[in-house]
Each structure stands twice: as structure tokens, then as C-alpha cells.
Image (tube, rainbow, N blue to C red):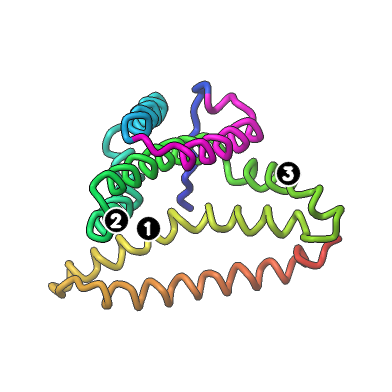
């Protein structure tokens, strides 16, 4: 199974999951309070340096970042069409910086560590009777786990279309992708229920 985590021995790999998650949360807050394109550009540059320091290789890095960078470009273009160039630049640099730092965190933190740490951080809410910490940790872990799987399925469906000489259209890709993803989600939900994970106290 594919995963966003990459084994390594960098500083970020050695840093505790809690420090990375809290640091990313604090950085996100700061980035959304800043409205200077220059400052946000510096943040994006620093994010790029941190990500490159993981030594994932240019091809692997591009494959990981391409979907989110494309999404950021689309959001920036919509912002440009509806608002000023300044606003579009702010959105693009802010989201790029956040995406690079977040990608660095997910590449250096295993899904299991994510689940354990988020579960621990959610325990105060559980004590207040607001949520079940284990459910939050499991939900976020599954989201992180599904991202590379969905991308892998998309590429497989696209390659299958090309191999059959079919024209690649968004609709012809989206329908089988959604069906396969929902089927996989049902299988995982059934496995969780069979093990009684959501019923555990």
C-alpha cells in the first residue's frame, strides 16, 4: 500500500509528532494573519527549503506536490478573476507555503504516529463529553491514508484509458474513481466494524 510517509533520518523525522503538528497549526495561523506577499513569499521559500531537505528526489517531490500546486493555481486564478492581483498573489504564496510545510510534516510522520498523537490531543474534548478521541484520530488517519490511494487509482484509470485508445475526459475518469473509492471505503468501514473498533470504550 502506498503511503505519504517516507523513512529517513532528517531533523523532521526525529522531531516528535506533537511538535510537528502543533508547529504546523501555529504556522498556519500566522500565515493566515499575514497579508504581505513579500513575507508570504519568504515563507514559501523556507517551506521549499525544508521540503527539499528531505531528499525525496525531484521526480517524487513533483508527483507528490503536483495535485496540490495545481489546485492552488486554480484557486489563485479564480481569486485574480474576482479580486485584485495583490489578493491573488497573497492566496498563491500563502497556500504554497502552507502546502510545502504540511507536505514535509506528512512525509516525515507515519500514519500511526498521526493517529496516536491526534487521539492524545483530542482527549480533553473527550473528557468534556464532546467527542470520542479515538474516532477523531482514526478519521484523520484514514484521510491521510486515502490520499495516495486515490491518486494511485486516478493514474491507473487514466493509463487504462490511454492504453485502450480512449480519450481522457474528466467525467470518464471521475465516475470509476468515485466508485472504486466508495467501494474501498465500504470495505474499510466493514473491517472496522468487524473488529469492534468504533464500539470500544
Q: Is 185 in front, or is 18?
A: 18
The 10 Å Cα crowd at callout 1, few under 14, some 14 to 19, many 20 or more, is some
- Residue 29, can we see it? yes
Q: Earlier in the sequence, mark 1 or mark 2?
A: 2
The residue tagged with tag 2: helix, strand or loop? helix
Q: Earlier in the sequence, mark 1 or mark 3?
A: 3
- Residue 52, can we see it? no
Contact, CB < 8 Å: mark 3 with mark 2?
Answer: no
Above or below residue 168? Residue 15 is above
Instruction: State left or right for residue 65 relative to residue 20.
Output: left
Q: Which residues are magenta?
A: 12-36
User: Residue 188: x and y, percent?
Assistant: 60, 67
Cα separation between marks 3 and 2:
35 Å
Q: Nearer the viewer, mark 1 or mark 2?
A: 2
Tell me which residue sits at (75%, 44%) in the image: 120
The 10 Å Cα crowd at callout 3, few under 14, some 14 to 19, many 20 or more, is some
Q: Which residue is mark 1?
A: 151
User: Residue 147: x and y, percent?
Assistant: 46, 56
Question: Is 35 colored magenta in this rendering?
Answer: yes
Cα separation between marks 1 and 2:
26 Å
Q: Which residue is mark 3?
A: 121
Give me the disc on residue 79.
Answer: 2
Amino acid at each position: 500500500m502506498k503511503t505519504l510517509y517516507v523513512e529517513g533520518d532528517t531533523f523532521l523525522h526525529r522531531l516528535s509528532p506533537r511538535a510537528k503538528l502543533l508547529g504546523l497549526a501555529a504556522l498556519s495561523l500566522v500565515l493566515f494573519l499575514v497579508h504581505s506577499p513579500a513575507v508570504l513569499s519568504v515563507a514559501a521559500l523556507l517551506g521549499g527549503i525544508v521540503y527539499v531537505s528531505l531528499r525525496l528526489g525531484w521526480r517524487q517531490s513533483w508527483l507528490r506536490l503536483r495535485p496540490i500546486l495545481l489546485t492552488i493555481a486554480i484557486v489563485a486564478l479564480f481569486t485574480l478573476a474576482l479580486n485584485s492581483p495583490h489578493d491573488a498573489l497573497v492566496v498563491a504564496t500563502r497556500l504554497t507555503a502552507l502546502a510545502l510545510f504540511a507536505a514535509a510534516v506528512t512525509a516525515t510522520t507515519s500514519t500511526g504516529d498521526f493517529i496516536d498523537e491526534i487521539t492524545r490531543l483530542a482527549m480533553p474534548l473527550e473528557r468534556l463529553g464532546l467527542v470520542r478521541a479515538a474516532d477523531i484520530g482514526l478519521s484523520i488517519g484514514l484521510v491521510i491514508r486515502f490520499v495516495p490511494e486515490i491518486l494511485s487509482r486516478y493514474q491507473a484509470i487514466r493509463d487504462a484509458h490511454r492504453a485502450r485508445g480512449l480519450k481522457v475526459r474528466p467525467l470518464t475518469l471521475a465516475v470509476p474513481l468515485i466508485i472504486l473509492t466508495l467501494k474501498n471505503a465500504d470495505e474499510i468501514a466493514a473491517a472496522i466494524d468487524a473488529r469492534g473498533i468504533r464500539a470500544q470504550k
